[in-house]
């Protein structure tokens, strides 16, 4: 016993090689594991939950997955914003292709549409975000790049006309083509949607859009509890997380329930016409069949489903 | 043999009657079925919600500086005063008046007051051919001159609205001409724009 004790000296040579390797291995292993887990550990304190991170693509979700997701998102909103909301998954309507037209002879540039979008779609209050940008244009030019958005004088001003621009829901959307992760796609009724859980925030789509229609959430949207619109769509106006791209969805949470988009209802002059392009009796078809209609940047071949017209 | 023949003589018509009855019932029932289907179809096409167009409640009432026993302001009908005044068809501007309505501005083409107001009944309006028309139906009056706007309105591409684009799902409410256009000064007035965007770089369309 005593002789055994005497040979247990703190000398490396006395410790078995196996023990050393084991200890070394374990230490390195723990260190490597800690390093590997660091990003996830960081998530623990961030806005993105593990559930959000591991969320599957919208198209791969079963009805049950979706209902779990929507419950979780509603819980999130309750926790972070203190508001009860209803989130629904609005499916594209059968035999429906949405079209939107805007009468430039009537639009006065009051920006009520832009404001209504801001409220309806739970946009960040600080950045005053909206999917609609109203351009003040000089008569004689149709170049939207020359339009100005920062006018504050009474409207309509002499020799100016006003052109609100939002997502054109293109038939050939360049924004969809460039998405490296297929987080954005065009649905059967023509609406281009974004899976906010799948978007990686690379902003390629924002760069690809010829109409400057996409917006990026640089920060977590701030919306006062009482101003939150509680009627929300999973692919539309539910409060978006930080770091993802968003866009106009023709208010699919309204329009797929048969209602008018918020920007149309807000228009005081009735410059906006919305409806089903497949219905020959619809108001939108009347405009397309009878008015001198044009689309923005037609030469790009994007085939917008948003039309502009002038009265004769 | 004889019995059998007699049976046939009686039975054949009987069978024919029975078969006939069955056939008739079947045809009738299939016809009724068609009718029911037809009803269902017409029900579906009828099951469209209405489009409510805003209308003035009635002829305008003029406020007075009197109050009734309940403290409500007393209002009077246009005809209260106009019954005692002789109409002047040449009048085109309020500035030509010496009593009442002096402050009014009027910029609506070359019309005079009595182009639209009815000198026979000041609680109603007047069409171009002299027929009387109620204030509630003012849009028909506007439509006499503003045909293209009226046509576009009827086809849903002029005038603000709220509600449902799909009328099988819900109703719609539409503005009246006079909700947006003051009949005396119909041009849509200038407004100050709301909700100016935050544009860090100035004014370019990139935001």
Image: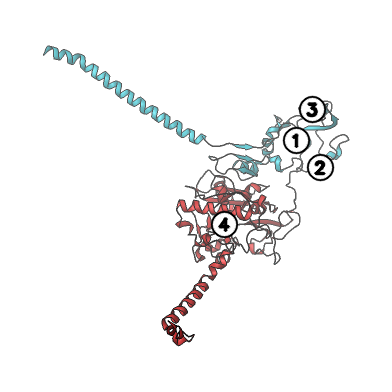
Q: Which residue is mark 4?
A: A168
Q: Are marks 3 and 1 on the same chain?
A: yes
Tell me if mark 4 has few (under 14), some (14-19) or many (20+) residues whose alpha carbon lies within 10 angstroms of its own. Answer: many
Chain that is coloured cyan in the picture: B
Q: Are the residues flagged by discs 2 and 4 in contact, CB closer than 8 Å? A: no
Q: Which residue is mark 2?
A: B105
Does label 2 or label 3 sit earlier along the sequence?
Answer: 3
- Is there a contact, CB below 8 Å, between mark 4 and mark 1? no
Quarter of the image that includes the C terminus of chain B: bottom right
Q: Pick the residue in front: A34 or A131.
A: A34
Mark identifier at residue B79: 3
User: From this viewpoint, is residue A219 visible?
Assistant: yes
Going from the N terminus, do you reach mark 3 or mark 1 first?
3
Please state the horizontal and vertical placement of residue B94, each as a whole percent of the image: 83, 39
How far separated are the C-alphas under marks 2 and 1? 16 Å
Q: Depth check: A270 or A295 in front?
A: A270
Q: CA distance from mark 4 to mark 1?
A: 45 Å
Q: Circle 1 sits in a helix, a strand or a loop, which is it?
A: helix
User: Dividing the image into 4 quarters, which one contains the N terminus of chain B?
Assistant: top left
Mark 4 vs mark 1, foreground winner is: 4
Q: Which mark is residue A303?
A: none
Q: Are marks 4 and 3 in contact (CB under 8 Å)?
A: no
3D distance between C-alphas at marks 4 and 3: 54 Å
Residue at 60% across / 52% down in the picture? A78
Instruction: Read off the residue under disc 1.
Output: B115
Secondary structure of the residue carrying numbered label 2: loop
Q: Chain A: what color?
A: red
* Labels 2 and 4 in the same subunit: no
């Amino acid at each position: 016993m005593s002789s055994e004790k005497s040979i247990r000296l703190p000398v490396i040579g006395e410790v078995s090689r196996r023990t050393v390797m084991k200890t070394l291995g374990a230490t390195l292993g723990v260190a490597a594991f800690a390093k590997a887990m660091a990003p996830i550990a960081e998530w623990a304190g961030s806005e993105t939950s593990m559930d959000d991170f591991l969320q599957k693509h919208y198209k791969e979700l079963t009805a049950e997955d979706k209902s779990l997701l929507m419950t979780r998102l509603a819980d999130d909103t309750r926790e972070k914003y203190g508001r009860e909301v209803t989130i629904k998954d609005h499916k594209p309507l059968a035999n429906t292709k949405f079209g939107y037209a805007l009468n430039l002879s009537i639009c006065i540039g009051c920006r009520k549409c832009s404001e209504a979008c801001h409220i309806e779609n739970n946009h960040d209050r600080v950045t005053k975000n909206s999917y609609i940008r109203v351009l003040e244009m000089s008569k004689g030019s149709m170049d939207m790049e020359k339009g100005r958005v920062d006018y504050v004088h009474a409207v309509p001003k002499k020799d100016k006309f006003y052109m609100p621009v939002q997502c054109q829901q293109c038939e050939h959307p360049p924004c969809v083509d460039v998405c490296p992760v297929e987080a954005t796609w065009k649905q059967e009724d023509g609406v281009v949607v974004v899976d906010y859980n799948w978007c990686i925030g690379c902003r390629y789509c924002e760069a690809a859009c010829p109409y400057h229609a996409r917006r990026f959430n640089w920060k977590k949207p701030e919306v006062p509890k009482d101003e939150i619109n509680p009627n929300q769509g999973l692919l539309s106006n539910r409060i978006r997380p930080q770091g993802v791209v968003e866009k106009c969805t023709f208010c699919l949470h309204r329009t797929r329930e048969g209602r008018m988009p918020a920007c149309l209802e807000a228009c005081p002059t009735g410059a906006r016409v919305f409806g089903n392009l497949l219905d020959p009796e619809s108001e939108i078809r009347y405009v397309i069949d009878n008015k001198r209609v044009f689309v923005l940047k037609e030469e790009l071949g994007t085939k917008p489903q948003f039309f502009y017209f002038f009265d004769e | 043999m004889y019995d059998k023949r007699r049976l046939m003589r009686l039975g054949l018509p009987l069978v024919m009657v029975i078969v006939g009855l069955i056939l008739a019932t079947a045809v009738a029932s299939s016809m009724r079925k068609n009718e029911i289907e037809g009803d269902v179809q017409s029900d579906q096409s009828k099951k469209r919600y209405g489009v409510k167009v805003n209308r003035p409640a009635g002829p305008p009432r003029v406020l007075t500086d009197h109050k009734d026993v309940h403290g409500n302001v007393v209002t009077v009908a246009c005809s209260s005063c106009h019954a005692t005044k002789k109409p002047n068809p040449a009048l085109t501007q309020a500035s030509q008046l010496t009593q009442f309505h002096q402050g009014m501005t009027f910029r609506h083409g070359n019309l005079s007051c009595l182009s639209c107001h009815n000198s026979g009944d000041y609680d109603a309006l007047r069409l171009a051919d002299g027929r009387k028309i109620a204030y509630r139906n003012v849009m028909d009056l506007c439509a006499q001159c503003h045909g293209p706007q009226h046509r576009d309105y009827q086809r849903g591409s002029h005038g603000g609205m709220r509600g449902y684009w799909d009328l099988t799902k819900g109703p719609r409410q539409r503005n009246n001409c006079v909700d947006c256009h003051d009949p005396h000064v119909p041009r849509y007035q200038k407004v100050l724009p709301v909700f100016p965007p935050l544009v860090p770089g100035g004014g370019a369309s990139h935001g």
